[in-house]
Each structure stands twice: as structure tokens, then as C-alpha cells.
Amino acid sequence: MNPRALQMIEEALGPMIRSGCRIERIKLVVCPTSLIASFEVIRTKFGDVKVEPDDLVRKGLSFLMEDPGRKGRGFVWVSGYTPDVQKKQA
């Protein structure tokens, strides 16, 4: 696995774990045609994370999501999503 990809996953996982999410309830959702989709599990410094390919996720995007069942369910983008925060000038 690409070390940079693993670093990005672990950087995104850190705040989720510290906020109370349990590693066994977190999955990495990726595009089915991405290289990482070939893995069933990714081993991180926090523990193993399940990889779940999803046809609705386009290539270049990935996110971590906690399974339902806890109030304040965890979610964080890992790659590919950058919200447009620039304000339009009048």
C-alpha cells in the first residue's frame, strides 16, 4: 500500500478515534475501480479498518464513516473533497 495513502487515512482517523468512535465500527468507503478497493482491510496504527467499495463514490474520493448506532456518528473525508470556501467578491 502507498505510504502516503496510509498516512492520509491515519490523519483522518485520529480525530474520529479521539472523539469516541470505535475502530471496529469504522469503514473506509472508496471507488470500486481504485487500487485501494482491492484490499479488504487496511492495517493502521489505530487498528484494522474495513474497506468498502461503493459505486456512488467517484475515483479520487474516499471517506471514513462510522456504522450507525451512536449519536453523533463519525464521518470524515480522506481525499478528494475540498469545500469551496472562497467568497465571491461583488
Image: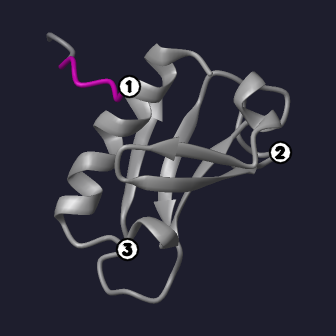
Pointer 1 local density, CA inside 10 Å: few below 14, some 14–19, many at least 20: some
| Disc 1 + disc 3, Cβ < 8 Å | no
Q: Which residue is mark 2?
A: 55
- Whether residue 33 is visible, yes or no, is yes
Q: Which residue is mark 1?
A: 7
Pointer 2 local density, CA inside 10 Å: few below 14, some 14–19, many at least 20: few
Q: Nearer the viewer, residue 71 or 19?
A: 19
Q: Quadrant of the N terminus?
A: top right
Among numbered discs 1 and 2, the one appearing first in the sequence: 1
Q: Secondary structure at mark 2?
A: loop
Residue furthest to the top: 89
Query: Does residue 26 belong to the magenta stretch?
Result: no
Can you give x and y, in whole percent of width and height, for residue 28 in the image? 58, 49
Q: Residue type at mark 3?
A: Arg
Residue positioned 72% across, 31% down in the render = 58
- Whether residue 81 is visible, yes or no, is no
The magenta segment is: 82-87
Pointer 3 local density, CA inside 10 Å: few below 14, some 14–19, many at least 20: some
Can you give x and y, in whole percent of width and height, for residue 51 in the image? 67, 49
Can you give x and y, in whole percent of width and height, for residue 47 in the image? 44, 55
Above-or-below relation of 33 to 14: above
Quarter of the image where one finds residue 59:
top right
Q: Which residue is mark 3?
A: 73
Q: CA distance from mark 2 to mark 3?
A: 22 Å
Q: Residue type at mark 1?
A: Gln
In the rendered view, does 14 fall on the left or right side of 53? left
Q: Quadrant of the C terminus?
A: top left
Residue positioned 47% across, 28% down in the render = 6
Q: CA distance from mark 1 to mark 3?
A: 23 Å
